[in-house]
Image (cartoon, grey):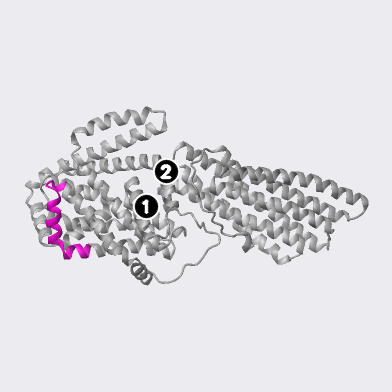
Amino acid sequence: MDLSMIVALFAGLGLFLYGMQIMSDALQKSAGDRLKKLLEILTTNKFLGVIVGAVITAIIQSSSATTVMVVGLVNAGIMNLSQAVGVIMGANIGTTMTAQIIAFKFENIVPYAIIIGTPIALFSRKKSHKQLGELIMGFGILFMGMNMMSNAMKPLKEIPEFTQFMIGLQHNPLLGVLAGLLLTVIVQSSSATIGILQALAMQGLVPINTALPILFGDNIGTCATALIASIGTSLTAKRAAILHITIKIIGTIIFLIILQPVTSLVALTASEPARQIANAHTLFNITNTVILLPFTSMLISFANKVIPGEDTYDKFALKYLDKRILETPSIALGQIVKEILRMGDIAKCNVQKGMDAIIKGDEKLIDEIYNNETVINELEKRIGEFLQAVLQSAIGVEQQKKAGMLFNTIHDMERIGDHAENLAEIAQYKLDNKVLFTNYAVDELKEVFDSVDMAMESAFLALSTENTAYVEAVDAYERKVDELTDSFRASHINRLNKGECNINAGVLFLEILSNLERISDHCVNVADVIRVVDHSKLKLDRMSEISPEKC
């Protein structure tokens, strides 16, 4: 094997990977909102999980990216292991699409794909046209790389050492599995290594009975990415990665036992070697899913034994976000909304605690408010950093606009928390100085708080459901808060003039009204995200980390 052949092989591999990445990015940009919808319809139904995993992987063209995302979603607590098993199996099926596409003979149209796709991608102003151009260009580059790899391997026929190596693999399937595993671990893409295998088969260098064990090894090797991604994650996320490799190993053992019948069956499905390998890849993953899906609970039990113990909860940690889901920014944005809502629920809970501390004189609630405020401040920082990372990813114009607005929303949630802290300080001063409110004042504060509380809930529902009816509700509650505040200020000043309450109580009363009014203003800002950004009509669950009932 001379240097020019090695250079051509790696150049072809580089083009192949680059073309696949361009195609993946283009598909993600155009299908971003659909990916979010697919994630949202995911339920505990493992069969639905298989479908979702297969579709998402077919869109993003990488089972490694999907399984890494699954590890991230499990780590963020969004997905349980039962759901993860189905999605992982679906991803294994979805990734076979690449091999099937490669098996088509597109050599003659590759130059035209690059000629047509490149100017569309570079010069189109319309986003959808630009993404279509990137998709066509990526397709052309992928097949150009495939052709380069295939041509680079032609001289291998004349190398005795390579021929002997292939004969050795033919008589030792386990060695073939090991070769495929190591190559995929190195390249970090089973699609690429299976592409290399197909290129070898096109040149008649690898018979199908030798190719199959290598193919099984490729399938095991792709698990390395998820295993690496699970480092530093929760125990549950580590178990998801273990499930992935367990599924592949079990499937490989089954197929090695029945290797000869499988080889005969695959040979009947097509005459072209590349298509035979693609069909074997699809058959392996579909059969594996059909066999193992009924035994999901046993697989989970095995993963729990391999990774024993229980996860500890860090109240400062991001619950719905994990850096691994940055692989799909569109999904990451949806999860950011959930994390902001969690932050908002803590702030809302603090406002309620603040009012209870003022009215009931409960000092324990004041300490709880200060503890929660440290969580709110830390979440503001961490969510902001994650949102910045999303902005640096490949996202569309609408998604960039939404991400920019969400920065303001994070700040508004934090400011609601600050006003709750102000209420705690007022409660502490009221206790220390034995300040008493009249029954009139208490009733008026409760009435204002009820409207503020409804404004917060409506604002959070507007953000989570993207339903403009909730935006209108926020506006109505905010107007009511303003009217009540003006009216109660006037009546309170009237009571002061009549000597019905003391000056200290009067000052505190007005400060409380001012803080509640500012909270309702921030609720309007939160709802404004729905008014300003042209969202898709995605429905998110109202997932409260701390609900009012728990306050």
Mark 1 residue crowding within 10 angstroms, few (<14) / some (14–19) / many (20+): many
Task: Specify whether 43 is left or right of 367.
Answer: left
Visible in this render: residue 382? no
**Stretch of the chain drawn in magenta:** 252-274
Q: Write the residue at 24% across / 59% down.
A: 287
Report x, y in % for residue 242: 34, 64
Q: Quick check: is 23 in the magenta stretch?
A: no
Which mark identifies residue 32? 2
Closest to the observer: 484 or 109?
Answer: 484
* Element assignment for label 2: helix
Magenta stretch, overall SS? helix
Report x, y in % for residue 468: 58, 42
Amino acid type at image mark 1: Val
In this figure, what is the number of numbered marks?
A: 2
Contact flag, marks 2 and 1 (Cβ < 8 Å): no
Report x, y in % for residue 58: 32, 47
Q: Quick check: is 260 in the magenta stretch?
A: yes
For disc 1, the marked residue is 52
Which mark identifies residue 22? none
Task: Specify whether 330 is left or right of 53.
Answer: right
Task: Check the image and report above or below for 544 versus 271.
Answer: below
Q: Nearer the viewer, mark 2 or mark 1?
A: 1
Q: Write the residue at 70% across / 62% down.
A: 366
